[in-house]
Each structure stands twice: as structure tokens, then as C-alpha cells.
Image: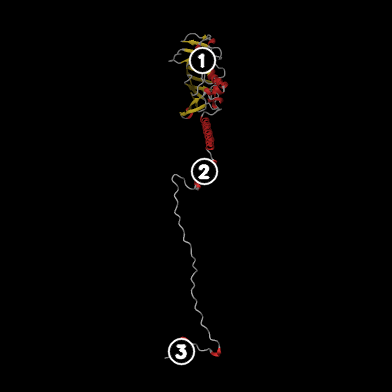
């Protein structure tokens, strides 16, 4: 049996030299756990269904925004804005319509015969004429002098006025002959002499398109229907088929309408769509007019800067 001093657990380390105090061993660190906090368990409340027939317990943001907009924008304001918008749209449509009309008028002006064309001097000319009432009733050829107004008319050989002649050496005294008989001074009321005299009054100064397309007529009362070029070189002509609004011209400018009737086309009526065809040659000389409504049709066959002297029956 061993003594207590021999127990290993009771052994001591030998004293360090120099008689120092013995060194105690460092204590071992004990791990610490985080503190535990107790929590009350979360209570889950089941959703409560709304009573039958009741609406939602609250409004969404979208519903609230819609309600505010409805209050700030009532139906009568929306209606007023709609009416104002319709008025603006109608005004825009009217503006577009009149703008298109203006553009069309400008385009027609560009394609119609040039205004104020420089044409050659025409002293004498020969014109074939086929016209009936309300224009002068004529079927033949007129040769005239544009200065002295001397003229001669010969009826077409196969027409209703075959064998008739009308001459005026000075533009005032008129002589008539029928079927080769003697010349007679035209008696008052002679229809043939009156028709020739009336035709000469219209034809004597018709040298360019301006004599038909007057400035008043060009100002919105003429519409180009068709432009056709015929022939080549010096023989080329351009035919213009137009639609004239003489009814509007008469309504808006009666004086210009009367002047047009007295100087351009005899017997012209007040018509919304009067179809007139004119023809000009390479020198811009007016060489033809055709108006089916008034039956006024003529064609220039020649012109010259030389004078024309008609037969004077008084000289024998």
C-alpha cells in the first residue's frame, strides 16, 4: 500500500530555482452559448369573407383614380370638347377643300394658254364659220380686214347658204347677191347681211386666246378638261377643252358676263358647265373656237399682215 505522498494527483512540481513562487496553470476557457430569448408564438388569423352581396372592404388605387377623374371630368365637359373638336375638324376639311381648289386653279392657269401672248400682226384673215342660233346663222367663209373692217362672205357650196355673197368695202355699207343675180344694197332686216355683220364684229379682233379667256373668266371661272397637241413644227396646234362657269360669273360680276357675251361668244348663256374648245397655233394665234351650247364654231384657215380690199359693187 502506497503512501498518500505517492499519489500522482497530489504531486507538485518542483520549486523553481531561486525560491520563486510556484506558477499556477492558466484556466481553460469555457464556450458561451448565445442568450436565448423566448417569443410569443405568432397568431394566424384566418381571412374573414365579406357578407354576401357586399362590395369590397376598400377601393384599389385604380378605382380611386378613376373616381377622381370622373368627378373632375363630367360628361358635359367631354361633350363640349367633342363638339369643339368636330368644329375644328370641319374647319380643317373646308380649308383643305378650298386649298385643293386653289391649287387646281393654279395648275389650270399653268396649263391654259399663256395670258398676254405676243402674237404676229394680223391685218387680214380668212375664217370658215359654221354657226346657228343663238349665234349668227352662217355656213361659209369670211375674209376680212381687221383695220378697215372690209369683208366678203361666200356661202359654202353644199350648205344651206350656197350661192349667196355678202360684201362690204368699208365695213358699213353692205351689199348682197344671191345665185349670181345683181348686187343689191342689203335692205333693212336682211337676215343674212345681219348675221355676217354680227359675226365680223366678233371675229375682227379675235387674234389670241385672251379674246376668249378674259381676265375675269380666268379668275376662277374656267377649268381645263383636256389639252391635246396636234401636228408638228410650224403646223402644230394645241387644242384646249375647257369648262366655263358663266352662271357664277354672271352672279358675281354681271358687267364682266355681259362683256364676255358681247365680245367673246355670241349668245352665250348662264351655264354652270359650259364646254368650250379653243385652238391656238405655234405662234399662239387663236385659230379655232367651238361652243356646242351656243352653236358658235369657226376655224381660221389663213392670216397675213397684208391688207384685204373687198369687192366694191358700187364701182360696177
- Front label number (2 vs 1): 2
At horizontal 50% and vertical 11% (from top left) the residue drawn is 191
Residue 180 position within the rendered picture, expressed as x and y whole percent measured from the top left:
47, 10
Residue of label 2 = 67
The reply to whether dot 1 and dot 3 touch (C-beta < 8 Å) is: no
In space, the residues marked 3 and 2 are separated at their CA atoms by 99 Å
How far apart in space, not on screen, are marks 2 and 1 (Cα)?
A: 88 Å
At label 3, counting other C-alpha atoms closer than 10 Å, the crowd grade (few under 14, some 14-19, many 20 or more) is few
Q: Is residue 165 above or below residue 114?
A: above
Q: Which x, y percent locates residue 116?
A: 56, 27
Label whose residue precedes the other's in the sequence (3 or 2)? 3
Q: In this view, does 193 lie above or below 15?
A: above
Whether residue 38 is situated above or below residue 195 in the rendered picture: below
Toward the viewer: 108 or 57? 57
Q: Which of 64 and 231 is in front in this view?
A: 64
Q: Is mark 3 on a helix, strand or loop?
A: helix
Q: Which residue is denoted by mark 1 in the rendering?
A: 196
Amino acid at each position: 500500500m502506497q503512501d498518500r505522498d505517492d499519489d500522482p494527483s497530489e504531486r507538485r512540481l518542483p520549486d523553481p530555482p531561486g525560491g520563486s513562487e510556484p506558477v499556477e496553470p492558466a484556466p481553460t476557457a469555457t464556450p458561451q452559448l448565445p442568450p436565448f430569448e423566448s417569443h410569443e408564438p405568432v397568431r394566424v388569423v384566418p381571412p374573414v369573407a365579406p357578407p354576401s352581396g357586399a362590395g369590397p372592404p376598400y377601393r384599389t388605387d385604380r378605382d380611386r383614380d378613376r373616381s377622381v377623374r370622373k368627378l373632375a371630368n363630367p360628361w358635359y365637359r367631354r361633350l363640349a370638347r367633342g363638339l369643339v373638336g368636330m368644329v375644328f375638324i370641319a374647319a380643317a376639311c373646308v380649308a383643305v377643300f378650298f386649298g385643293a381648289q386653289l391649287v387646281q386653279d393654279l395648275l389650270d392657269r399653268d396649263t391654259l394658254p399663256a395670258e398676254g401672248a405676243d402674237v404676229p400682226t394680223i391685218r387680214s384673215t380668212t375664217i370658215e364659220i359654221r354657226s346657228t342660233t343663238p349665234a349668227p346663222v352662217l355656213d361659209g367663209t369670211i375674209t376680212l380686214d381687221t383695220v378697215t373692217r372690209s369683208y366678203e362672205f361666200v356661202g359654202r357650196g353644199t350648205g344651206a347658204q350656197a350661192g349667196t355673197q355678202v360684201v362690204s368695202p368699208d365695213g358699213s355699207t353692205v351689199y348682197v347677191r344671191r345665185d349670181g343675180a345683181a348686187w343689191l344694197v342689203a335692205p333693212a332686216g336682211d337676215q343674212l347681211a345681219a348675221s355676217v355683220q354680227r359675226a365680223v364684229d366678233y371675229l375682227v379682233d379675235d387674234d389670241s386666246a385672251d379674246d376668249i379667256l378674259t381676265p375675269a373668266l380666268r379668275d376662277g371661272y374656267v377649268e381645263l378638261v383636256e389639252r391635246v397637241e396636234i401636228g408638228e413644227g410650224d403646223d402644230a396646234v394645241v387644242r384646249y377643252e375647257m369648262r366655263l362657269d358663266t352662271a357664277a360669273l354672271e352672279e358675281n360680276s354681271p358687267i364682266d358676263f355681259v362683256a364676255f357675251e358681247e365680245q367673246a361668244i355670241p349668245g352665250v348663256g348662264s351655264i354652270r358647265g359650259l364646254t368650250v374648245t379653243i385652238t391656238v397655233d405655234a405662234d399662239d394665234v387663236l385659230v379655232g373656237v367651238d361652243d356646242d351650247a351656243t352653236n358658235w364654231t369657226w376655224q381660221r384657215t389663213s392670216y397675213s399682215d397684208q391688207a384685204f380690199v373687198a369687192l366694191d359693187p358700187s364701182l360696177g
